[in-house]
Amino acid sequence: MAQVTVRFFARYAELTGCESAAVRVPDNSATVRDVLERVRETVPGARSLPARPLAALNLRQVKLDARVSDGDEVALLPPLSGG
Amino acid sequence: MAQVTVRFFARYAELTGCESAAVRVPDNSATVRDVLERVRETVPGARSLPARPLAALNLRQVKLDARVSDGDEVALLPPLSGG
Amino acid sequence: MMTHLTRSPISVASLLAEVHSAERGGTCVFLGTVRDDDDVTGIEYSAYDDMALAEITRIVDEARGRWPEARVTLQHRVGLIPVGEASIAIAAAAPHRDEAFAACRFVIEEVKQRLPIWKKELRGDGSEKWVEAHDHR
Amino acid sequence: MMTHLTRSPISVASLLAEVHSAERGGTCVFLGTVRDDDDVTGIEYSAYDDMALAEITRIVDEARGRWPEARVTLQHRVGLIPVGEASIAIAAAAPHRDEAFAACRFVIEEVKQRLPIWKKELRGDGSEKWVEAHDHR
């Protein structure tokens, strides 16, 4: 199994009441989408996240089908509003 | 006759050795071009001014056929290079 | 080197000093400041710091790739920013003004699209609201 | 109110203060500085002061006509300006950044075309040269 750190920001941190969680997904073929599924199962409040949130993997925006590896950091990002 | 003040700037002031001159032109139909002709006759060094210099009349750029009146200020402007 | 994310008021002079030099005759600066829309008294900005810094580095590198003679820098402020104060400042200096304007504009557009930074509006009546759509400031 | 022609160094902070307000969330600044081209050590700027001031007023009014919610101002320095220092600064603030950039760009283009101001380059070898063509800084 791969252990992935999941981080929640801004409104998503409020929704889940959580800033960071560790989830485990199968080692070889898991994607950000799989991480998101695990999060919905294990983090209370995560069910109210949108179906396809913006996500980042290791500090870069990625699509939900990006592959994850042990030690990766996935972040779930509300719509960006910097500037 | 109308009396017009003519002002020279930058390189034109150097060429003519003059910053300001008074010229007299006919009262009713004289233009900036006529003023320029008078200047060439009366101001030493003004013959080396270009044939059609940039000109301003009472603080606005004008064409050489603009009419002048008594008390007007005509300025002869080298190519602008502000900014 | 300035830090690109700060919790303190932004100094435009420091940004200018960082990009300016004697061979770069045109400098364009953009400042985004908190507007007094509706009953807004301030905006609380929060960031995914590590990713924001990484994106800023990538954006600055991309700008340098497009305009090799330009130098650009930016500072984004986070935390509570009162109405009227700057949340972002960008400075772009180049030998000629076309590149300075273009590089500055490029950076603000990329910042708006890419930085993982979020705004929560604070209102005079004590209410708060996450800003979820791009504004067009 | 600031004077639009000055013989002293330009203060960007004063320009910003003049255009900024809480409803104008985007501010664009352009600075033109004396470049160290060739052997240039400084540029002597001279102006037809009365006409330059009249043109500046007209340009600012035209900008306000096009972008009614924007505020723009500018300062042009005259006299001897050493390499690296600003000869012109423009600030344009507007509710949104599009107008701020557009108004700032408009003003610098008009300034370059319309202000009766002239440059004489001063070189390290003591020579001087009138600049007679538009540069593209």
Image (tube, coloured by chain):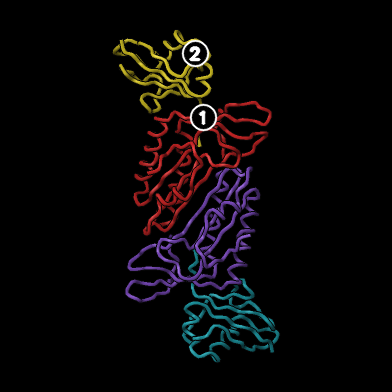
Chain colours: A yellow, B cyan, C red, D purple
Coordinates of residue D62 in the picture (x, y in percent) = 63, 58
Q: Mark 1 points at which residue?
A: C118
Distance between the alpha carbons at the discs numbered 2 and 1: 19 Å
Q: In this view of the protein, which residue sits in the foreground, B33 or C137?
A: C137
Q: Residue at x 60, y 48 (%)?
A: D20
- Where on the picture, by quarter, is residue A7? top left
Residue B34 is left or right of residue B70, and the answer is left
Name the residue that disc number 2 marks: A46
The subunit carrying tag 1 is: C
Q: Quadrant of residue C73?
A: top left
Whole-percent x, y for residue B32 in the image:
61, 80
Residue lying at 38% horizontally and 41% vertically, measured from the top left: C60
Amino acid marked by disc 1: Trp
Query: Which residue occupies the foreground of this view, C25 or C14?
Result: C14
Nearer to us in this view, A41 or C81:
C81
SS class, disc 1? strand
Q: Which amino acid does label 2 sit on?
A: Ala
Please say if D63 is above or below D53: above
Residue D86: percent from left, percent from top = 46, 61
Q: Which mark is residue D17?
A: none
Q: Which residue is drawn at 47% across and 21% down?
A: A53
Residue closest to the far front: C8
